[in-house]
């Protein structure tokens, strides 16, 4: 719920007064005005990373990021604050979860083994290995390998999104039309990154493309995707995990050029 006083004044008037005075009380009122952004992102984030469920902690991190966004926001550039703040809040939450090291060692070991196996097979074969080839390399059955992929999906999600934010996306201000305005170099970098990701997504198999689209574009949950595709939740997670590892590998090669 928004603070009654801020509702009476209105966001535009608050921004005008704050821009003129840089008054701390006005800054705090703006934070209250936009605190719903933090709560919405926190609910989605905690729901996605099932091994991290400390809502109060992640909300606090989001509020700190929101306060920083208010202080650094340039109202004169006609930027949509909600978009700019959401990017910064989301990035802060991802960074906080990463630092908590809240994932079981067993999952980390499984994710590492899969990654190492895929890298070795990729070098040996000159292409991405199939699931069966990776399972054979690990000397396990295909169903066991698929189960491992499903279990490590959340780790792959965090690792992939962390890489995206390390690129500096959280520092990009976005205009109402969707164009970056941080500077010409950043505009070029972001467009190149989007082009690389779009190209790499096209190289995924059909099911992987569908899962990526439904999850990130349509904002559907795993259970909702499983209903749409007519497959189990674990199968969706396995497909999602496989797609993210491929995208992360391609993105890492692009960033290391």
Image (cartoon, grey):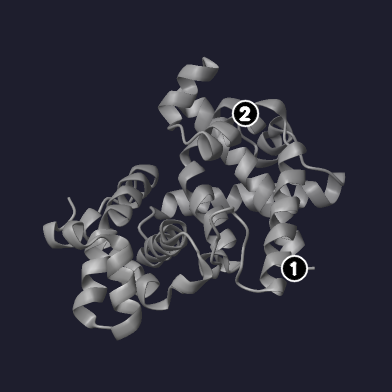
Q: Residue visible at 49% across and 25% down?
A: 225
Q: Which residue is mark 2?
A: 210
Mark number displayed over residue 256: 1
Residue 130, relative to residue 16: is it above or below?
Answer: above
Q: Earlier in the sequence, mark 1 or mark 2?
A: 2
- Secondary element at tag 2: helix
Closest to the observer: 67 or 257?
67
Residue at the right extreme? 126
As measured in the structure, the alpha-carbon distance from the residue carrying label 1 to the one carrying label 2 is 28 Å
Left or right of residue 221, residue 195 in this image:
right
Residue 245, relative to residue 64: is it above or below?
Answer: above
Rendering coords of residue 82 (x, y %): 41, 57
Q: Do residues under tags 1 and 2 come within 8 Å of each other at their CB atoms?
A: no
Rendering coords of residue 152 (x, y %): 49, 44
Quadrant the C terminus occupies: bottom right
Q: Quadrant of residue 243?
A: top right
In this rendering, which labeled residue sits more in front, label 1 or label 2?
A: 2
Closest to the observer: 24 or 85?
24
Rendering coords of residue 174 (x, y %): 55, 61
Residue at the top extreme? 230
Q: Residue visible at 74% across and 66% down?
A: 188
Residue 206, relative to residue 182: is it above or below?
Answer: above
Q: Is residue 38 visible from the viewing direction of this image?
A: yes
């Amino acid at each position: 719920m928004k603070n009654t006083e801020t509702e009476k004044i209105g966001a535009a008037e608050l921004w005008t007064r704050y821009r003129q005075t840089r008054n701390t009380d006005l800054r705090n009122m703006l934070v209250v005005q936009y605190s719903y952004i933090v709560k919405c992102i926190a609910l989605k984030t905690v729901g996605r990373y099932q091994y991290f469920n400390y809502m109060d902690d992640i909300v606090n991190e989001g509020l700190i990021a929101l306060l920083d966004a208010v202080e650094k926001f340039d109202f004169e550039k006609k930027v949509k604050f909600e978009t700019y703040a959401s990017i910064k809040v989301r990035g802060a939450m991802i960074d906080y979860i990463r630092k908590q090291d809240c994932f079981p060692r067993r999952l980390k070991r499984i994710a590492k083994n899969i990654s190492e196996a895929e890298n070795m097979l990729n070098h040996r074969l000159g292409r991405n290995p199939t699931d069966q080839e990776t399972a054979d390399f690990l000397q396990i059955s295909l169903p066991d390998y698929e189960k491992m992929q499903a279990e490590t999906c959340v780790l792959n999600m965090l690792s992939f999104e962390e890489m995206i934010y390390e690129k500096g996306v959280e520092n990009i201000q976005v205009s109402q039309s969707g164009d970056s305005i941080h500077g010409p170099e950043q505009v070029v970098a972001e467009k190149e990154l989007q082009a690389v990701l779009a190209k790499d997504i096209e190289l995924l198999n059909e099911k992987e493309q569908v899962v990526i689209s439904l999850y990130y574009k349509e904002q559907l949950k795993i259970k909702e995707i499983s209903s749409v595709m007519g497959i189990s939740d674990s199968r969706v997670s396995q497909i999602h995990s496989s797609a993210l590892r491929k995208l992360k590998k391609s993105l890492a090669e692009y960033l290391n050029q």
